[in-house]
Image (cartoon, rainbow, N blue to C red):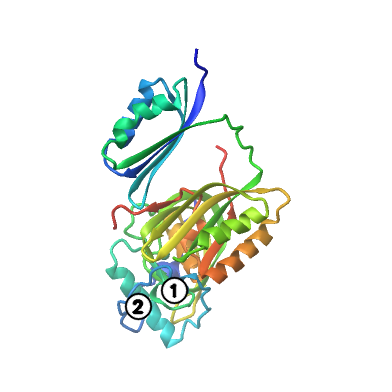
Amino acid sequence: MTAVSLHAITVLGHDRPGIIAETTRALAGLGLNIEDSTMTLLRGHFAMMLICAGEASSGDIEHALSALTEDGSLTVSVREVPEEPEHAALGTTYVLTVHGGDRAGIVSTLVGEVARVGGNITDLTTRLSGDLYVLAAEVDLPAEVDADALQAQLRSAGDDLGVGVALRRMESDEL
Amino acid sequence: MSSDPVDDAVGRWTERDLPVEGRVLEVVRAPATVLSSVGADVDPADPDVVQLAADLVATMRVSPGCVGLAAPQVGVGSRVFCVDVSAHPKTRSHHGTFVLCNAEVVQSSRNEKAREGCMSVPDLTGDVKRATRVVVAGVLPVTGERVQIEADAFEARALQHEIDHCDGLLFLDRVAGAHAIHARKTYL
Ligand SMILES: [Zn+2]
Protein backbone atom coordinates (compact mmCIF):
# COMPACT_ATOMS: atom_id res chain seq x y z
CA MET A 1 0.00 0.00 0.00
CA THR A 2 1.30 3.46 -0.89
CA ALA A 3 1.00 6.25 1.62
CA VAL A 4 -0.59 9.55 0.70
CA SER A 5 2.05 12.11 -0.18
CA LEU A 6 2.13 15.71 -1.35
CA HIS A 7 3.64 16.88 -4.61
CA ALA A 8 4.48 20.36 -5.81
CA ILE A 9 3.94 20.64 -9.56
CA THR A 10 4.82 23.57 -11.80
CA VAL A 11 3.86 24.04 -15.43
CA LEU A 12 5.53 26.90 -17.29
CA GLY A 13 5.77 28.03 -20.87
CA HIS A 14 3.95 29.11 -24.00
CA ASP A 15 0.27 29.85 -23.34
CA ARG A 16 -2.49 28.19 -25.34
CA PRO A 17 -6.05 27.10 -24.54
CA GLY A 18 -6.36 23.71 -22.83
CA ILE A 19 -3.22 23.53 -20.66
CA ILE A 20 -5.14 23.57 -17.38
CA ALA A 21 -7.68 21.06 -18.69
CA GLU A 22 -4.94 18.64 -19.82
CA THR A 23 -2.98 19.02 -16.59
CA THR A 24 -5.91 18.53 -14.26
CA ARG A 25 -7.26 15.60 -16.34
CA ALA A 26 -3.92 13.81 -16.00
CA LEU A 27 -3.80 14.48 -12.26
CA ALA A 28 -7.38 13.31 -11.77
CA GLY A 29 -6.51 10.15 -13.69
CA LEU A 30 -3.95 9.37 -10.99
CA GLY A 31 -6.51 9.98 -8.26
CA LEU A 32 -4.72 13.12 -7.08
CA ASN A 33 -6.53 15.90 -5.25
CA ILE A 34 -5.53 19.47 -6.02
CA GLU A 35 -5.15 21.07 -2.60
CA ASP A 36 -3.95 24.58 -3.52
CA SER A 37 -3.18 26.02 -6.93
CA THR A 38 -2.51 29.29 -8.63
CA MET A 39 -2.20 30.13 -12.28
CA THR A 40 -1.43 33.37 -14.04
CA LEU A 41 0.19 34.80 -17.14
CA LEU A 42 3.61 36.34 -16.58
CA ARG A 43 4.51 38.55 -19.56
CA GLY A 44 2.21 36.27 -21.56
CA HIS A 45 3.86 33.07 -20.34
CA PHE A 46 1.62 30.43 -18.80
CA ALA A 47 2.62 29.80 -15.17
CA MET A 48 0.84 27.36 -12.87
CA MET A 49 1.79 25.90 -9.50
CA LEU A 50 -0.16 23.22 -7.68
CA ILE A 51 0.09 21.19 -4.51
CA CYS A 52 -1.53 17.78 -4.97
CA ALA A 53 -2.22 15.00 -2.50
CA GLY A 54 -2.53 11.34 -3.40
CA GLU A 55 -0.84 8.01 -3.69
CA ALA A 56 0.98 8.57 -7.00
CA SER A 57 4.76 8.82 -7.06
CA SER A 58 6.74 11.67 -8.65
CA GLY A 59 7.58 9.34 -11.52
CA ASP A 60 3.91 8.50 -12.11
CA ILE A 61 3.02 12.19 -12.20
CA GLU A 62 5.85 13.10 -14.54
CA HIS A 63 4.79 10.31 -16.86
CA ALA A 64 1.15 11.37 -16.79
CA LEU A 65 2.13 14.95 -17.67
CA SER A 66 4.70 14.02 -20.31
CA ALA A 67 2.38 14.83 -23.21
CA LEU A 68 2.48 18.51 -22.13
CA THR A 69 6.22 18.74 -22.63
CA GLU A 70 6.45 16.76 -25.87
CA ASP A 71 6.59 19.69 -28.28
CA GLY A 72 9.01 21.64 -26.07
CA SER A 73 6.63 24.56 -25.45
CA LEU A 74 6.06 23.76 -21.76
CA THR A 75 8.25 22.61 -18.92
CA VAL A 76 6.86 20.60 -16.02
CA SER A 77 8.49 19.96 -12.68
CA VAL A 78 7.27 17.54 -10.03
CA ARG A 79 8.69 17.26 -6.56
CA GLU A 80 7.50 15.55 -3.41
CA VAL A 81 7.13 18.02 -0.56
CA PRO A 82 6.51 17.58 3.16
CA GLU A 83 3.31 18.63 4.88
CA GLU A 84 3.78 22.24 6.02
CA PRO A 85 2.02 23.56 9.08
CA GLU A 86 -0.37 26.37 8.09
CA HIS A 87 1.32 29.68 8.86
CA ALA A 88 -0.53 31.32 11.65
CA ALA A 89 -0.49 35.06 10.95
CA LEU A 90 2.49 36.58 12.72
CA GLY A 91 0.72 39.69 13.82
CA THR A 92 -1.01 42.21 11.63
CA THR A 93 -1.31 42.08 7.85
CA TYR A 94 -0.34 45.12 5.79
CA VAL A 95 -0.53 45.87 2.09
CA LEU A 96 2.70 47.21 0.62
CA THR A 97 2.37 49.03 -2.70
CA VAL A 98 5.14 50.45 -4.84
CA HIS A 99 4.95 52.22 -8.18
CA GLY A 100 7.36 54.16 -10.29
CA GLY A 101 9.78 54.02 -13.17
CA ASP A 102 11.24 50.62 -13.91
CA ARG A 103 14.77 50.06 -12.66
CA ALA A 104 16.81 47.21 -11.27
CA GLY A 105 16.66 46.56 -7.55
CA ILE A 106 13.23 47.90 -6.64
CA VAL A 107 11.84 44.60 -5.36
CA SER A 108 15.04 43.37 -3.71
CA THR A 109 15.64 46.65 -1.88
CA LEU A 110 12.13 47.03 -0.53
CA VAL A 111 11.50 43.41 0.41
CA GLY A 112 14.93 43.51 2.06
CA GLU A 113 13.64 46.26 4.37
CA VAL A 114 10.63 44.10 5.23
CA ALA A 115 12.81 41.05 5.93
CA ARG A 116 15.16 43.11 8.12
CA VAL A 117 12.38 43.69 10.69
CA GLY A 118 11.17 40.08 10.53
CA GLY A 119 8.17 40.80 8.28
CA ASN A 120 6.86 37.87 6.25
CA ILE A 121 5.59 38.40 2.71
CA THR A 122 2.64 36.05 2.15
CA ASP A 123 1.58 37.19 -1.31
CA LEU A 124 3.25 39.31 -3.94
CA THR A 125 2.62 40.40 -7.50
CA THR A 126 4.64 42.77 -9.65
CA ARG A 127 3.78 44.11 -13.05
CA LEU A 128 5.55 46.12 -15.69
CA SER A 129 3.12 48.21 -17.72
CA GLY A 130 4.98 50.31 -20.27
CA ASP A 131 7.52 52.30 -18.20
CA LEU A 132 5.48 51.85 -15.03
CA TYR A 133 6.60 49.27 -12.52
CA VAL A 134 4.02 48.25 -9.90
CA LEU A 135 4.36 45.98 -6.87
CA ALA A 136 1.63 44.91 -4.45
CA ALA A 137 2.40 42.62 -1.54
CA GLU A 138 0.74 41.38 1.60
CA VAL A 139 3.04 41.52 4.58
CA ASP A 140 2.59 40.01 8.04
CA LEU A 141 4.40 42.08 10.64
CA PRO A 142 5.18 40.72 14.09
CA ALA A 143 3.37 42.59 16.87
CA GLU A 144 6.57 44.24 18.11
CA VAL A 145 7.36 45.88 14.74
CA ASP A 146 6.64 49.60 14.55
CA ALA A 147 4.75 49.83 11.24
CA ASP A 148 5.15 53.62 11.03
CA ALA A 149 8.89 53.31 11.40
CA LEU A 150 8.98 50.60 8.72
CA GLN A 151 6.86 52.77 6.44
CA ALA A 152 9.35 55.63 6.92
CA GLN A 153 12.26 53.28 6.08
CA LEU A 154 10.44 52.01 2.99
CA ARG A 155 9.60 55.57 1.87
CA SER A 156 13.18 56.67 2.20
CA ALA A 157 14.41 53.61 0.29
CA GLY A 158 11.69 54.37 -2.28
CA ASP A 159 12.87 57.98 -2.61
CA ASP A 160 16.37 56.74 -3.42
CA LEU A 161 14.91 54.44 -6.09
CA GLY A 162 12.53 57.11 -7.40
CA VAL A 163 9.40 55.10 -6.59
CA GLY A 164 6.38 55.83 -4.42
CA VAL A 165 5.81 53.44 -1.51
CA ALA A 166 2.76 52.96 0.71
CA LEU A 167 2.27 50.57 3.62
CA ARG A 168 -1.32 50.32 4.80
CA ARG A 169 -3.07 48.04 7.21
CA MET A 170 -5.01 45.39 5.32
CA GLU A 171 -8.70 45.90 5.82
CA SER A 172 -11.02 42.95 5.97
CA ASP A 173 -14.69 43.09 6.70
CA GLU A 174 -16.24 40.37 8.77
CA LEU A 175 -19.68 39.73 7.40
CA MET B 1 -32.87 59.29 0.84
CA SER B 2 -33.40 61.41 3.92
CA SER B 3 -31.98 64.67 2.61
CA ASP B 4 -31.04 66.04 -0.75
CA PRO B 5 -27.25 66.02 -0.67
CA VAL B 6 -26.82 68.32 -3.66
CA ASP B 7 -25.25 71.65 -2.77
CA ASP B 8 -26.95 74.47 -4.70
CA ALA B 9 -23.90 76.53 -5.57
CA VAL B 10 -21.98 73.50 -6.81
CA GLY B 11 -25.02 71.90 -8.47
CA ARG B 12 -25.73 75.09 -10.45
CA TRP B 13 -22.12 75.60 -11.45
CA THR B 14 -21.18 74.90 -15.06
CA GLU B 15 -18.05 75.56 -17.06
CA ARG B 16 -19.94 78.47 -18.67
CA ASP B 17 -19.27 80.26 -15.36
CA LEU B 18 -15.62 80.38 -16.39
CA PRO B 19 -14.67 83.51 -18.37
CA VAL B 20 -12.18 81.66 -20.57
CA GLU B 21 -12.26 78.94 -23.20
CA GLY B 22 -10.76 75.61 -22.12
CA ARG B 23 -7.96 74.01 -24.09
CA VAL B 24 -7.51 70.27 -24.43
CA LEU B 25 -4.25 69.31 -22.72
CA GLU B 26 -2.21 66.16 -22.91
CA VAL B 27 -2.81 63.75 -20.01
CA VAL B 28 0.37 62.76 -18.16
CA ARG B 29 0.96 59.07 -17.40
CA ALA B 30 2.62 57.32 -14.48
CA PRO B 31 5.49 57.16 -13.62
CA ALA B 32 5.61 60.96 -14.09
CA THR B 33 6.92 62.66 -10.94
CA VAL B 34 4.14 65.26 -10.90
CA LEU B 35 1.62 62.47 -10.22
CA SER B 36 3.43 61.53 -7.02
CA SER B 37 3.98 65.07 -5.71
CA VAL B 38 1.73 66.88 -3.26
CA GLY B 39 -0.06 69.72 -5.07
CA ALA B 40 0.15 73.34 -3.94
CA ASP B 41 -2.87 75.28 -2.67
CA VAL B 42 -4.06 77.83 -5.22
CA ASP B 43 -5.69 81.26 -5.35
CA PRO B 44 -9.02 80.48 -7.05
CA ALA B 45 -9.14 83.94 -8.66
CA ASP B 46 -5.66 83.67 -10.20
CA PRO B 47 -6.13 83.85 -14.00
CA ASP B 48 -3.81 80.85 -14.41
CA VAL B 49 -5.99 78.82 -12.07
CA VAL B 50 -9.14 79.90 -13.89
CA GLN B 51 -7.56 78.87 -17.19
CA LEU B 52 -6.47 75.57 -15.64
CA ALA B 53 -10.04 74.94 -14.44
CA ALA B 54 -11.35 75.48 -17.97
CA ASP B 55 -8.60 73.29 -19.44
CA LEU B 56 -9.36 70.44 -17.04
CA VAL B 57 -13.05 70.47 -17.99
CA ALA B 58 -12.25 70.69 -21.71
CA THR B 59 -9.81 67.78 -21.46
CA MET B 60 -12.29 65.70 -19.43
CA ARG B 61 -15.00 66.38 -22.03
CA VAL B 62 -12.99 65.00 -24.94
CA SER B 63 -11.83 61.90 -23.04
CA PRO B 64 -14.28 59.01 -23.41
CA GLY B 65 -15.47 57.64 -20.06
CA CYS B 66 -13.57 60.28 -18.08
CA VAL B 67 -15.48 61.36 -14.95
CA GLY B 68 -12.81 63.53 -13.36
CA LEU B 69 -9.40 65.02 -13.95
CA ALA B 70 -6.93 66.60 -11.53
CA ALA B 71 -4.28 69.24 -12.23
CA PRO B 72 -1.31 66.85 -11.73
CA GLN B 73 -2.73 64.76 -14.58
CA VAL B 74 -2.12 67.64 -16.96
CA GLY B 75 1.32 68.24 -15.49
CA VAL B 76 0.41 70.99 -13.00
CA GLY B 77 1.20 70.40 -9.31
CA SER B 78 -1.85 72.27 -7.98
CA ARG B 79 -4.84 71.35 -5.87
CA VAL B 80 -7.48 71.76 -8.58
CA PHE B 81 -9.72 69.12 -10.13
CA CYS B 82 -12.92 68.73 -12.08
CA VAL B 83 -15.59 66.04 -11.76
CA ASP B 84 -18.66 65.10 -13.77
CA VAL B 85 -20.23 61.75 -12.99
CA SER B 86 -23.68 62.68 -14.29
CA ALA B 87 -23.60 60.17 -17.17
CA HIS B 88 -22.17 57.24 -15.21
CA PRO B 89 -24.42 54.24 -14.45
CA LYS B 90 -23.06 53.83 -10.89
CA THR B 91 -24.01 57.41 -9.99
CA ARG B 92 -26.80 58.10 -7.51
CA SER B 93 -26.96 61.78 -6.62
CA HIS B 94 -24.55 64.15 -8.34
CA HIS B 95 -23.60 67.80 -8.72
CA GLY B 96 -23.12 67.78 -12.51
CA THR B 97 -19.90 69.35 -13.71
CA PHE B 98 -17.82 71.30 -11.23
CA VAL B 99 -14.29 72.37 -10.43
CA LEU B 100 -12.97 72.55 -6.88
CA CYS B 101 -9.79 74.15 -5.60
CA ASN B 102 -7.96 73.27 -2.36
CA ALA B 103 -10.51 70.55 -1.59
CA GLU B 104 -10.37 68.10 1.25
CA VAL B 105 -12.51 65.31 2.62
CA VAL B 106 -13.91 66.46 5.97
CA GLN B 107 -16.14 63.46 6.72
CA SER B 108 -16.38 59.96 5.32
CA SER B 109 -18.26 56.78 6.08
CA ARG B 110 -19.46 53.43 4.73
CA ASN B 111 -16.49 51.92 2.94
CA GLU B 112 -17.01 49.82 -0.13
CA LYS B 113 -14.54 48.10 -2.43
CA ALA B 114 -14.78 48.69 -6.17
CA ARG B 115 -12.54 48.51 -9.20
CA GLU B 116 -11.29 51.82 -10.53
CA GLY B 117 -9.10 53.08 -13.31
CA CYS B 118 -7.33 56.31 -14.16
CA MET B 119 -6.36 58.05 -17.39
CA SER B 120 -2.85 58.42 -15.97
CA VAL B 121 -2.55 54.64 -15.47
CA PRO B 122 -4.30 53.57 -18.67
CA ASP B 123 -3.38 49.88 -18.73
CA LEU B 124 -4.22 48.91 -15.15
CA THR B 125 -7.21 48.92 -12.83
CA GLY B 126 -7.30 48.33 -9.08
CA ASP B 127 -9.69 47.24 -6.34
CA VAL B 128 -9.86 50.14 -3.89
CA LYS B 129 -11.90 50.52 -0.77
CA ARG B 130 -13.36 54.00 -0.40
CA ALA B 131 -16.10 55.73 1.53
CA THR B 132 -19.49 55.79 -0.20
CA ARG B 133 -20.54 58.93 1.67
CA VAL B 134 -18.26 61.92 2.00
CA VAL B 135 -18.41 65.57 2.86
CA VAL B 136 -15.88 67.56 0.85
CA ALA B 137 -14.95 71.17 1.47
CA GLY B 138 -13.28 73.39 -1.11
CA VAL B 139 -13.57 76.63 -3.04
CA LEU B 140 -15.00 77.36 -6.49
CA PRO B 141 -12.72 78.88 -9.11
CA VAL B 142 -13.14 82.57 -10.07
CA THR B 143 -15.42 83.58 -7.16
CA GLY B 144 -13.54 81.71 -4.45
CA GLU B 145 -16.87 80.86 -2.87
CA ARG B 146 -16.36 78.37 -0.06
CA VAL B 147 -18.52 75.28 -0.56
CA GLN B 148 -19.13 72.07 1.28
CA ILE B 149 -20.73 69.22 -0.62
CA GLU B 150 -22.18 65.90 0.44
CA ALA B 151 -21.58 63.20 -2.10
CA ASP B 152 -22.53 59.54 -2.24
CA ALA B 153 -21.88 56.42 -4.31
CA PHE B 154 -19.87 57.02 -7.48
CA GLU B 155 -19.50 60.77 -7.04
CA ALA B 156 -18.01 60.16 -3.57
CA ARG B 157 -15.50 57.74 -5.11
CA ALA B 158 -14.61 60.16 -7.92
CA LEU B 159 -14.05 62.99 -5.42
CA GLN B 160 -11.74 60.87 -3.27
CA HIS B 161 -9.82 59.72 -6.35
CA GLU B 162 -9.30 63.33 -7.55
CA ILE B 163 -8.42 64.66 -4.08
CA ASP B 164 -5.87 61.83 -3.87
CA HIS B 165 -4.32 63.09 -7.14
CA CYS B 166 -3.97 66.54 -5.55
CA ASP B 167 -2.17 64.84 -2.63
CA GLY B 168 0.19 63.01 -4.98
CA LEU B 169 -1.56 59.65 -4.61
CA LEU B 170 -2.73 57.23 -7.29
CA PHE B 171 -5.26 54.41 -6.86
CA LEU B 172 -2.20 52.14 -6.95
CA ASP B 173 -1.30 53.50 -3.49
CA ARG B 174 -4.59 52.24 -2.09
CA VAL B 175 -5.20 48.82 -3.64
CA ALA B 176 -6.70 46.24 -1.31
CA GLY B 177 -4.15 43.43 -1.65
CA ALA B 178 -1.49 41.63 -3.65
CA HIS B 179 -4.02 40.54 -6.28
CA ALA B 180 -5.94 43.80 -6.46
CA ILE B 181 -4.17 45.24 -9.52
CA HIS B 182 -5.45 44.06 -12.88
CA ALA B 183 -4.42 44.48 -16.50
CA ARG B 184 -7.13 46.33 -18.35
CA LYS B 185 -8.46 44.09 -21.09
CA THR B 186 -10.62 46.61 -22.87
CA TYR B 187 -10.02 50.33 -22.73
CA LEU B 188 -13.09 52.53 -22.37
ZN1 LIG C 1 -7.01 59.42 -11.86
Q: Which residue, as the protein is rendered here, is positioned at the far right?
A: A144
Left or right: residue A174 versus residue A67 is: right
Residue type, label 1: Pro
Q: In this picture, is B76 found above or below A141?
A: below
What's the residue at 67%, 51% (across, down)? A118
- Disc 2 crowd, CA 10 A, few/some/many (<14, 14-19, 20+): many
Q: Nearer the viewer, residue B21 or A139?
A: A139
Percent from the top left, x then y, of residue B159? 46, 63
Which image quadrant is residue A18 in?
A: top left
Percent from the top left, x then y, of residue A109? 57, 61
Chain on which label 2 sits: B
Chain on which label 1 sits: B
The quarter of the image holding the C terminus of chain A is top right
Percent from the top left, x then y, of residue B70? 42, 71
Q: Are marks 2 and 1 in contact (CB under 8 Å)?
A: no
Q: Which mark is residue B55?
A: 2
Do the residues at discs 2 and 1 belong to one chain? yes
Q: Nearer the viewer, residue B51 or B93?
A: B51
What's the residue at 44%, 50% (across, down)? B114
Q: Quadrant of ligand 1?
A: bottom left
Q: In this picture, is B84 found above or below B38?
A: above
Q: Which comes sooner in the sequence, label 2 or label 1?
A: 2
Label 1, secondary structure: give it: helix
Which image quadrant is residue B31 in?
A: bottom left
- Disc 1 crowd, CA 10 A, few/some/many (<14, 14-19, 20+): many
Residue type, label 2: Asp
Residue B2 visible to the viewer: yes
Residue at image mark 1? B72
What's the residue at 52%, 66% (across, down)? A164
Give me the C-alpha separation between circle 2 and circle 1: 12 Å
Residue B130 visible to the viewer: no
Q: Which mark is residue A162?
A: none
